[in-house]
């Protein structure tokens, strides 16, 4: 019997299998090369929302991979100027000098609206109301203990503990801190002079005198520290205020009403901003129902990219965020953009 032809066929088959085996990694490498990777860094204020948008977009478009690291507004701007990222998140718009350092210029788009809330850790005090005087006293250092009369005045039915107040502030340069200190500066000329609106302020010496100030990086770091330290108080974006063991205070607004953070107060505040035709950070919104500290976070794109696929892809991601992506904003603790705000961003995008 002649075994030559079967053996030849076997040889051809083995050769074909070998080619397929060799080709498989190449195809995987080609797919990897075809995937478009977009890197961003910046503000932690919008991070939960951005990460959800980018994940959902990836599910529908697996070839687009967006990576966003929340390192603080100042860090994102620095990375964008240094050419290390494709986009940046910041709670403050770039200055003209900063924008001029980026070849081809930038497009700045308000993408996330949210509130800054005051969180605290007091066992047995699930609800707390803070007047403007109490809020200023806590963050200027003039209120040293939780049973202070300024706090007790708006909480007559609450047994406040005789505990020292520990303030938790951001360790990094932060847009959240800027908006918070800007609000406090609007309430008090003395606070404006002593501390002022700043991304990384010098807090009053009163805290250092009694070791009552702790610094933590990012919104997440502040929330985790407040959770870990009894008697502590801090400020974070609303979405970061829901760790077990911490609570969120209601705050007095410009109309003298004490408003708990939530959809009604946030919508009223953003509506106040829109009525004034201003998409800037809100210092102190008007309106009886308005929550007093809300603000916007900006996504900054380059006008020019070395890879021609990046800009149209980023524009498509933003269109998704302004459309279907708005459905998850309130679930994550942000304010859904009203139609005029979406139209404003779309015009900027064009």
Image (cartoon, helix red, strand yellow):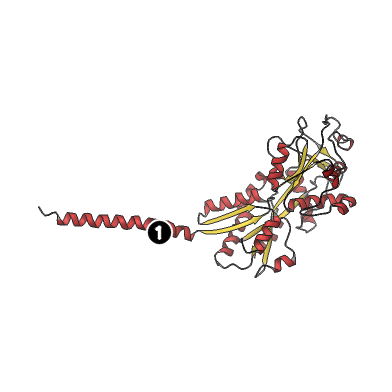
Residue 118 location in percent, x, y?
77, 42
User: Disc 1 marks which residue?
Assistant: 26
Q: Secondary structure at mark 1?
A: helix
Q: Is residue 120 visible?
A: yes
The image quadrant where one finds the C terminus is bottom right
- Name above or below for residue 144 compared with residue 314: above
Depth check: give the residue in front, 264 or 18.
18
Q: Position of residue 326 (x, y in %)?
A: 64, 51
Tell me if mark 1 has few (under 14), some (14-19) or many (20+) residues whose alpha carbon lies within 10 angstroms of its own.
Answer: few
Q: At 84% across and 54% down in the image, what residue appears? A: 196
Most foreground residue, 110 or 152: 152
At x 76%, y 31%, the residue is 123
Q: How many marks?
A: 1
Seen at 57% across and 50% down, the residue is 55
Q: Nearer the viewer, residue 34 or 14?
A: 14
In the picture, residue 148 is in which quadrant? top right
Task: Say whether residue 186 is left or right of residue 274.
Answer: right
Residue 84 lies, with reference to residue 118, above or below; the image says: below
Front residue of this view, candidates 341 and 28: 28
Q: From where the camera sits, is residue 284 visible? A: no
- Rendered location of residue 194, percent (x, y): 87, 52
- Residue 129: quarter of image: top right
Residue at the limit of the structure toward the bottom, as seen here: 104
Classify residue 232 as left or right of residue 27. right
Q: Residue furthest left?
A: 1
**What residue do we see at 75% from left, 64% from top?**
95
């Amino acid at each position: 019997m002649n075994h030559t032809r079967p053996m030849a066929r076997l040889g051809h088959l083995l050769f074909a299998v070998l080619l397929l085996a060799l080709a498989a990694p190449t195809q995987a490498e080609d797919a990897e090369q075809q995937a478009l990777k977009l890197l961003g860094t910046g503000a932690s204020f919008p991070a939960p929302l951005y990460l959800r948008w980018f994940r959902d977009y990836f599910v529908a478009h697996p070839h687009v991979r967006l990576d966003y690291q929340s390192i603080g507004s100042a860090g994102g701007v620095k990375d964008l100027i240094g050419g290390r990222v494709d986009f940046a998140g910041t709670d403050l718009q770039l200055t003209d000098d900063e924008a001029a350092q980026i070849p081809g210029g930038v497009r700045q788009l308000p993408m996330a609206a949210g509130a800054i809330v005051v969180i605290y850790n007091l066992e047995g005090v699930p609800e707390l109301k803070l007047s403007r005087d109490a809020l200023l006293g806590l963050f200027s250092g003039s209120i040293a203990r939780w049973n202070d009369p300024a706090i007790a005045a708006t909480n007559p039915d609450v047994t406040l503990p005789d505990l020292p107040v520990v303030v938790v502030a951001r360790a990094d340069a932060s847009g959240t801190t800027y908006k918070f200190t800007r609000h406090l500066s609007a309430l008090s000329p003395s606070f404006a002079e002593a501390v002022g609106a700043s991304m990384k302020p010098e807090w009053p010496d009163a805290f250092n005198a009694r070791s009552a100030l702790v610094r933590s990086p990012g919104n997440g770091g502040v929330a985790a520290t407040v959770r870990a330290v009894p008697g502590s108080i801090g400020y974070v974006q609303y979405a970061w205020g829901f760790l077990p063991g911490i609570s969120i205070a209601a705050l007095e607004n410009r109309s003298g009403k004490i408003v708990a953070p939530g959809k009604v107060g946030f919508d009223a505040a953003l509506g106040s901003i829109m009525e004034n035709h201003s998409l800037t950070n809100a210092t102190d919104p008007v309106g009886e129902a308005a929550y007093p500290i809300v603000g916007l976070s900006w996504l900054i794109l380059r006008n020019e990219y070395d890879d021609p696929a990046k800009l149209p892809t980023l524009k498509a991601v933003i269109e998704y965020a302004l459309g279907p992506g708005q459905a998850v904003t309130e679930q994550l603790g942000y304010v859904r953009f009203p139609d005029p705000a979406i139209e404003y961003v779309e015009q900027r995008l064009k």
